[in-house]
Amino acid sequence: MKLFAVLLPLACSFVFCVASDNATTELPDLIPDTIITNGYPAYEGKAPYIVSLNLRRDGSNSLTLCGGSIIAHNWVLTAAHCINDKHYVDIHYGSNWRWNGQYYHRVRSNNFIRHHLWPNTNGNDIGLIRTPHVNFNDRVNLVRLPTFNQRSEGFVNWWAVACGWGGQANGQIADWLQCVDQQIMSNQECSRTYGNIPFGILCLRTPGGRSTCGGDSGGPLVTHDNPILVGITSFGLASSCTTGAPAGFTRVSAHLDWIRQHSGVAYY
């Protein structure tokens, strides 16, 4: 059985309908507590590297919500499943409010790059978005990647922070950025829940139901010490985000060659 057959990619899709002069929102049924569960609201400037991605198809009112990470002046790293079959994205920079960043850029799909092995091989849920040049400040900045010397590093028991915006149990999307601090677990430990876990996947412990959830896809997992981007939010247990089951991420250190090949971004 393929790993993702029993897991839930953590993007959220919404449908926006216009009635008269007022926009109303029609939301699908969401799994309970579909936000970073039992986390905390981020203070301004906590995660200047995170961006909100609002993805659409031409001629459609549907909207897919994801996150991403700034890794260079003109590159955002996200999950491949976020940018699949989408025609453009509005990238919101520089604020904890999803819709009210310092500014946004609209980017067409010819600037999307998905890993060539996704979705047929587990552990490759990774994508790049080429963006216009972005200047850095205290609210908008990049996050470093692991170095090539860390390609085989498992980061087991390292503390890391995951942040994102997602749909809430009341059917509304979260406007304010939420974060959760947890420890990275070994793939052997994670395999007890999900079966065989390839090195391209990194798992996070979620005691007390503190976890990523729907709408957090593509967002960053960043180490506490000497902050580096080690994971891209990818999947969770389909039944609930509060069960204590591991949260699943794409392991960035497993894709350093791919990132360098397509973006030129690398750390040695």
Image: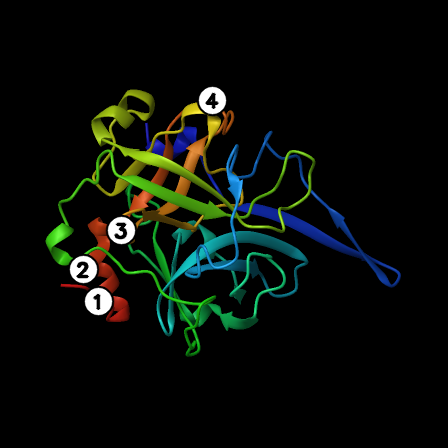
Judged from the image, the secondary structure of the residue bearing numbered disc 2 is helix
- Position of residue 10 relative to residue 151, above or below, is above
What amino acid type is highlighted by mark number 3?
Val
- Please say whether residue 84 is visible from this viewpoint: no
Q: Which tag is nearer the camera, tag 2 or tag 4?
A: 4
Mark 1 near mark 2, Cβ–Cβ under 8 Å?
A: yes
Could you classify mark 2 by the number of other residues whose Cα lies within 10 Å: few (under 14), some (14-19), or many (20 or more)? some
**In which quadrant will I find the C terminus?**
bottom left
Image point 46% across, 31% down: which residue? 210
Cα separation between marks 2 and 4: 35 Å
Name the residue tied to disc 4.
Answer: 243
Residue furthest right in the image: 20
Q: In this view, does 115 lie to the left or right of 219?
A: left
Cα separation between marks 3 and 1: 14 Å
What amino acid type is highlighted by mark number 4?
Thr
Percent coordinates x, y for residue 259 in the rendering: 25, 62
Mark 2 near mark 3, Cβ–Cβ under 8 Å?
A: no
What amino acid type is highlighted by mark number 1?
Gln
Name the residue tied to disc 2.
Answer: 257
Cα separation between marks 4 and 3: 26 Å
Residue 100 vs residue 266, the one in the foreground: 100
Q: Which tag is nearer the camera, tag 2 or tag 3?
A: 3
Cα separation between marks 2 and 3: 10 Å
**In which quadrant will I find the N terminus?**
top left
